[in-house]
Amino acid sequence: MWQAFTPQSPYRKRARLAAIIWTLLIFILCLWPGKELPQVDVPFIDKWTHFVLFAVFSFCWLCAFPSVQLRLLAAALLVSVGTGWVVELLQGWLTFLGRYYDVMDIWANGLGGLLGILLFGVLNRVAVRKAKAARAVNNNH
């Protein structure tokens, strides 16, 4: 399972499919008519929702293209922020949906994307250490 977080991951194709589905889900949920959304009495629920959606977004895309090269991680953050920005622009332009452009949602998207990247990075480090330990055990036998 830990291989999923390394460049040798055998799960890349499945991760790409999951990332594509998650991206579509973000657009569907964020462009769903506002009046049809359930009213939940949780402070900042909209911001938390954006945060979680984009944490999973960046995490899924990094699992699809597993690497901890700085340029890939930076690209993942830019794509996460860019996608969140596009969602917000669409919400602002498609006013008949009862949604609106919110700069704070873009911040929530970006911070969520950053969390997904950090989580992937931590899991990658654990996976690399486990692989090294397994190789050391195999070399000693």
Image: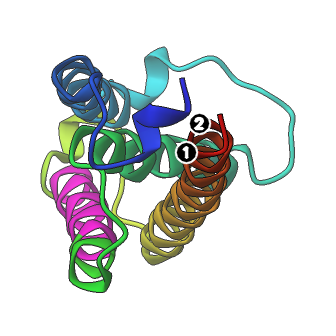
Q: How crowded is mark 1: few (under 14 residues within 10 Å), some or many (20 or more)?
A: few
Q: Residue at 29% across / 22% down in the picture?
A: 11
Q: Where is residue 51 in the image (x, y as percent from the top left)?
A: 58, 54
Q: Is residue 68 magenta?
A: no
User: What element does badge 1 sit on?
Assistant: helix
Q: Position of residue 114 (x, y in %)?
A: 51, 70
Residue 106 image label: none
Q: How is the image coloured?
A: rainbow
Tell me the chief SS of the magenta region: helix
Residue 127 in the image: above or below residue 73: above
Q: Disc 1 and disc 2: Cα gap in Å?
A: 5 Å
Give the labeled residue for mark 2.
Answer: 138
Residue 75 in the image: above or below residue 50: below
Q: How crowded is mark 2: few (under 14 residues within 10 Å), some or many (20 or more)?
A: few
Amino acid type, callout 2: Asn
Q: Which segment did they paint magenta? A: 76-92
Q: Which of 4 and 20 is in front in this view?
A: 4
Q: Nearer the viewer, residue 95 or 129?
A: 129
Q: Is residue 85 magenta?
A: yes
Residue 135 image label: 1
Q: Residue at 43% across / 76% down in the picture?
A: 103
Left or right for 42, reference 71:
right
* Quadrant into which the N terminus falls: top right
**Contact between labelled residues 2 and 1, with CB atoms less than 8 Å apart:** yes
Q: Residue at 60% across / 42% down in the picture?
A: 49
Residue 31 in the image: above or below residue 68: above
